[in-house]
Amino acid sequence: MNTIKQMLQLKTWAVVGATDNKEKFGYKIFKVMLESGLEVYPINTGVAEILGQKCYPTLKDLPVKPDAIDMVVPPRVGEQILRECAELGIQNVWLQPGADTQSVINLAKELGLTVVDHACIMVELRNKEA
């Protein structure tokens, strides 16, 4: 089974870079994941709530350990997030287009994380439901 299919079977997610700005992918991705019936936690230091869900400043602040995270952040932030994932034992990381630079992908592999890159989770969730 490929990594995308395996990840799409995971139920608990955190979206790092989720936002309440409806124009941004961090909002659209979070909304699509919620509507797909996943348990999703938004992560953003500057936002209190998104779509009625409490927003958490960091992965360490979550009430549960997610099965996977979806990253919608610039690469320099992404590297820091990957290190947090490794520390917290979060194995699965989905890098949205734009977050998936080679340096971020390389670091994820160095840390022993399972990575999906060059794929959008919104597209994959829609394909799964089709």
Image (spheres, rainbow, N blue to C red):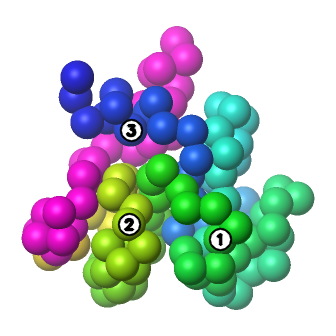
The circle drawn on residue 10 is none
- Residue range in magenta is 105-130
Tell which circle, 3 or 2, labels the residue nearer the N-terminal end: 3
Question: Do callouts 1 and 3 mark residues in contact (Cβ within 8 Å)?
Answer: no
Mark 2 or mark 1, earlier in chain: 1
Q: Is residue 111 left or right of residue 15?
A: left
Residue of label 2: 89
According to the picture, the residue beneath numbered tag 3 turns out to be 7
Q: Which residue is drawn at 55% across and 75% down?
A: 59
Q: Is mark 2 on a helix, strand or loop?
A: loop
Q: Would residue 102 be seen by someone viewing this image from the given angle?
A: no
The answer for how far apart the CA atoms under marks 3 and 2 are is 16 Å
- Packing grade of label 3 (10 A; few <14, some 14-19, many >=20) is many
The amino acid type found where label 3 is placed reads Met
Asked if residue 21 lies left or right of residue 122, the reply is right
Callout 3: helix, strand or loop? helix
What amino acid is found at the position of numbered circle 2 in the picture? Gly
Quote the CA–CA distance across marks 2 and 1: 13 Å
3 or 2: mark nearer the eye: 2
Whichever of labels 1 and 3 marks the residue nearer the N terminus, that label is 3
Q: Give the distance between the C-alpha atoms of the residues marked 1 and 3, in whole angstroms.
A: 20 Å
Q: Which amino acid does label 1 sit on?
A: Leu
Tag on residue 62?
1
Instruction: Answer with left or right where residue 102 lies relative to residue 57.
Output: left
